[in-house]
Each structure stands twice: as C-alpha cells, then as structure tokens.
Image (spheres, rainbow, N blue to C red):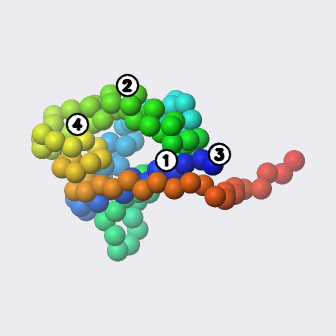
Amino acid sequence: MPSVVKINVLTVPEEMRRELEKRFAGRAGMVESADGFEWFELLRPVEGSDRYLVYTRWRSEEDFRRWQESRAFQAGHAQAAAEAAAQGHGHGQGHGHGHGQGGPAATDSELWTFEVVESTGPKQEG
C-alpha cells in the first residue's frame, strides 16, 4: 500500500505570515509521535503567492484519520486557538494557527490528498 500525502493549502495575508510560522514552530513535535506519521514540512511561498503548503506524509489514510481524531490533534488546535484569542486574534471560529476558514492567520484552507507513486532520496554510501 502506498503512502498518503496530505497537503493543507493555507491562504495567509502578508501581515500574518510570521504569526503562522511562529504557531507551527510552537507545535513542533506534536505530530511526530503519531502512529503512521512519516514526514512534515511547512512550505513558505517565495514569489507571487500568498499560499503556504503544510505537507504531511502518512503510512495510510487510516493513520491520518486516526491522528485527526486523536487527543494530540485536538489539543494542538485548541491550544493554538486559545493562544490566538489571548493575543486578540481570535474570531470565535476556525483554528488558531490558521487551519480552516475564519482562523486568524489564514483566510482560507483546502486539503489536497495524494498517493505516493514514486519517491527517491539521497543516495546512501557504504
């Protein structure tokens, strides 16, 4: 069974980019312990776009769904929302670090799903 890639596409206004990155940095380590987790990257747009890509790779769709339903996922999103509200960025809806419509850091979000067909990495010597 091929791995599954989930890419959350976040539209982030220029003035909220630093805040979004700060919130993700503050959550470091939360997803890495999830069963089936393989990879995470937060990709910053370089030119001509206001869309960040949150890239995660999972052993299976079931592993991703299990993580979404986990306490760690719920706690991380609740913590981000609480921090945003405490800083006066909360709108009473959405998620504090920018996932989902109405969040204070992102103005829009969509989730893309892919199966890994082919993958390569650096050649290991030895």
Q: Which residue is mark 4?
A: 81
Q: CA distance from mark 4 to mark 3?
A: 35 Å
- Res. 101 in view: yes
Number of other residues with Cα within 10 Å of mark 2, as a class: few under 14, some 14 to 19, many 20 or more: few
Number of other residues with Cα within 10 Å of mark 4, as a class: few under 14, some 14 to 19, many 20 or more: many
- Res. 29 in view: no
Q: Is residue 30 positioned above or below 100 on the image? A: above
Q: CA distance from mark 2 to mark 3?
A: 26 Å
- Give the image location of residue 76, x and y in percent: 34, 32
- Give the image location of residue 123, x and y in percent: 77, 56
Nearest to viewer (mark 4 / mark 3): 3
**Which numbered disc, 3 or 1, marks the residue that appears first in the sequence?**
3
Nearest to viewer (mark 4 / mark 2): 2
Q: Which residue is mark 2?
A: 71
- Give the image location of residue 23, x and y in percent: 32, 42
Q: Tag 4, which secondary structure?
A: helix
**Which numbered disc, 1 or 2, marks the residue that appears first in the sequence?**
1
